[in-house]
Every structure is written in C-alpha cells, then in structure tokens.
Image (spheres, grey):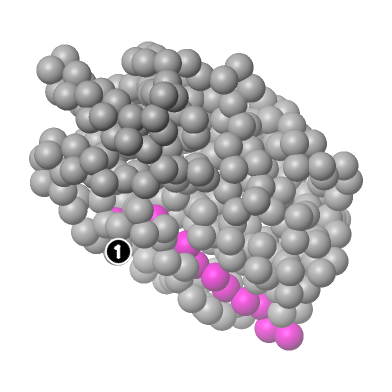
Amino acid sequence: MQALLDAIATMALPHDAQRVFHGRGGLHPACEHLALDAYPPVFVLTSFQPLPDEQLAAIGAALDARWQQLAPGQALNWVFQQRDEGRSHTRLMAGSVPDRHEVSEDGARFRVHVLKGQNHGLFLDMAEGRRWLRQQVAAQPGAKVLNLFAYTCAFSVVALQAGASQVVNIDMSDGALAIGKQNHALNGIGSGASYLPHDIFSSWGKITRGGPYELIVVDPPSHQKGSFIASKDYARLMRRLPDLLAPGGQALLCLNAPELGVGFLQEQMQQLAPTLQFQQRLANPAAFADVSDERSLKVLVYRAPD
C-alpha cells in the first residue's frame, strides 16, 4: 500500500476530475486492487478486494495530512467504494458530497454521482478520446457526430462546444441520457443534440437516416449482460461503419476489456470493414499507465476513403 500513500503525499491540488493513483495498471505490486480518483471537491478510493480497517485509517490519515497542505482550513471530503463479485458498497468517510456534484474537464462541466453505483457519470480514462474529438470537430466546424453508447453524453458536450452542427446520442439507459441532457444544459448548450434511448442493434434504420456522419464514437461496455458483450457484439458494429461514415469521415473505436488486445479490433476491422484505414491508437492519460498496452484501454482511429 506504500505506493498509494506516496502518491497521496506528492499529489497536486486537483482542479479537473482525474485519476490520482492507478494500481489497476499493475505497475505498483500489492496495490493492483486500488484506485484513487479526484472528483473535486471529493476524493473517491476504490478497492476491488476488502480493505482492513487499519489500512483505511492509514489512507484517510494520509489524505488528511496532504489536504491540510494543499487546502489549509478546508474540509477533506472522501468516499470509499469496495467492489467484489459485481457488487459495490459505498460509504462517505469524511466531509460531504455536494447535492449537485459537478466537475470540470478541459473547460466542460459534468454532473457526477460518487455515492451510488460503480459508474460515476464520467469515465476518467477516456479524457484523451474526448480531447481528440474536440480537436477533430474544431478542424471541421459543422461536422455531424454519431455517439454510440453515449452514457451521459460527455462526447456530445465537447463536440458541440467545438462546433459540431449535430450530435446523435444513442444509449439504452433513459437515466444516463437524462443526465446527458443536464450536462448539455450545464454547459449552456441548448440545441444540436438528439437523444435516442434505444437498443442500437434494433435502431439501425433511425441511425442510418440521420447520417452520414463525419465522426462516429463507439464506446461500448466490454461486458454488460443483456446489452453488449465485446467478444461477439463488436463485429455487429464494425460492419455498419462504412455505410454510416461520410467520405473521409473518422470512427473512434474504444475497447476496455483487458482480455482482448489491440489485434482483436484490428483483425476484425480488416475483415468486416476493409475500406476503413487504421490511423492511430490514442495514448491513454498518463495517470492510467499500465504494465501492458494489450491489457489497457484501447482507443483506435479509423478513416473512410475520400
């Protein structure tokens, strides 16, 4: 646990939402079960195995000591979540969590909920994907964007901020899309976004009629029973991409499944969408460094012919 304590002792004052310590990356032996995130003004410690009370107390003391250095006189707010066998238990350890908890990233603001559920409303590891999309849209104002598995629509927010004319957000979760609408309002975006609370695989007609798209984001769950299992369902998305992309359009394919390497995406794309050309793999945020590039988050860019 010393690596986590060292990271806490040297961390800077977080302003944007970000990961502080990534034990899951395997670079810190004996800390593989631990992650520490900042959703200012709250820290969230996640453990994927039970933590003894004395370890929790030591982490709390380290956070308190560093916080008094970074923000003297301000209350420390932190939450602990333990996950095991698909279940999670979350509790407030110190301070409080805002009733309307909003965080920032690159000038955009997002609603988060750190006291309930395993997903807090913003996937911190996808920050470079959102930055890439912002840059691409800024280079082609008026672009039309398709956001598949939109969740709370963070990609949509940054695309519309950058000058997209329209973003089509589709996700099976009404609740997630409702937060997505709040995120747009929070950023002063009153038009340009549409929301389809549907199963993507039964909605290709609507999706196709809204195209073609200059940019497509595909960011599915890796394994969500009854919704999407990457090993068998990703192929169903890939074969649709050539017909959905405008000439010269780009698709951002994301995969967060440690058991599936880069080759899984590249080989299937070569087979199912051979007209699309691989452009690059985006680097993950530095805070998410991993002992294995194959195991870590994969974010690949493909381009349609002109």
User: How crowded is the residue under tag 1: few (<14 C-alpha within 10 Å), some, or many (20+)?
Assistant: some
Residue at image coords 73%, 67%: 137
Inspect this view and state whether residue 174 appears.
yes
Span colored in magenta: 295-306
Q: Position of residue 219 (x, y in %)?
A: 55, 51
Q: Which part of the image, by quadrant, shows the N terminus?
A: top left
Residue 49 location, quadrant = top left
User: Residue farthest to the front?
Assistant: 73
Which residue sits at x=45%, y=54%?
255
Q: Residue at x 65, y 41 (%)?
A: 109
| Residue nearest the viewer, comparing 122 with 105 | 105
Residue in the foreground of this view, choosing between 32 and 70: 70
Residue for badge 1: 293
Relative vertical location of residue 42 with respect to residue 148 in this rendering, above or below: above
Question: Based on the displayed image, in which of its 4 quarters is residue 66 positioned?
Answer: top left
Give the percent coordinates (x, y) of residue 25.
Answer: 25, 50
Q: Is residue 306 above or below residue 260?
A: below
Q: Nearer the viewer, residue 127 or 266?
A: 127
Residue 272: percent from left, percent from top: 54, 69
Which type of secondary structure does the marked residue at label 1 adopt? loop
Q: Can residue 299 be found in the magenta stretch? A: yes
Q: Residue furthest right?
A: 191
Q: Quadrant of the C terminus?
A: bottom right
